Image: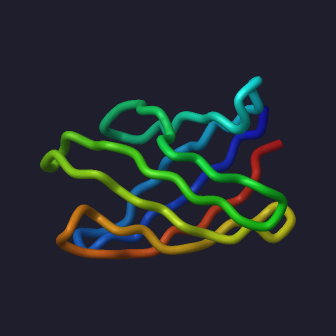
Amino acid sequence: MASWTITITAPTGAFDATLHLRENGDGPAGEMVGKNGTGPMLDLKLDATAIAWSTKVERPMPMKLKFQGIIDGDAMSGTVKFGIFASGTFSGTRGA
């Protein structure tokens, strides 16, 4: 299992989250843990150089976040779409 710490930059400010990634019999799986709770990483696509997933949040309002990024060794970065309203970026590092 790999853990990543990411910082998400939204129009309302930046916040941190932790990704817990693992391989199961059906492919990659994971969960995202943030200040507003824990949720599964839906539609997760992961390989050595790319990652994409979505997750649902309830606060500050219900919406689906869609992430798409690149992995370069122990670093990750990319874009995030906040529902239909806005977009931002994320970046992070692999945990020990």
Residue lying at the far top in this picture: please name it: 25
Q: Is residue 45 above or below residue 76?
A: above
Image quadrant occupied by the C terminus? top right
Q: Image point 15% across, 49% down: which residue?
A: 60
Residue lying at the far left in this picture: please name it: 61
Image quadrant occupied by the N terminus? top right
Q: Image point 77% across, 39% down: which residue?
A: 2
Rendering quarter of residue 19: top right
- Front-most of residues 14 and 68: 68
Residue 28 in the image, given as x and y percentages of width and height: 70, 38
Left or right relative to 13: residue 25: right
Left or right relative to 55: residue 86: left
Please say which color scheme the image uses.
rainbow
Residue 75 in the image, given as x and y percentages of width and height: 75, 66
Q: Image point 37% across, 65% down: which residue?
A: 14
Residue 79 in the image, given as x and y percentages of width and height: 48, 74
Label total for image: 0
- Front-most of residues 62 and 95: 62
Residue 43 in the image, given as x and y percentages of width and height: 51, 46
Q: Image point 77% across, 32% down: which residue?
A: 23
Q: Is residue 75 above or below residue 2?
A: below
Residue lying at the far front in this picture: please name it: 26
Rendering quarter of residue 70: bottom right
Q: Is residue 14 above or below residue 95?
A: below
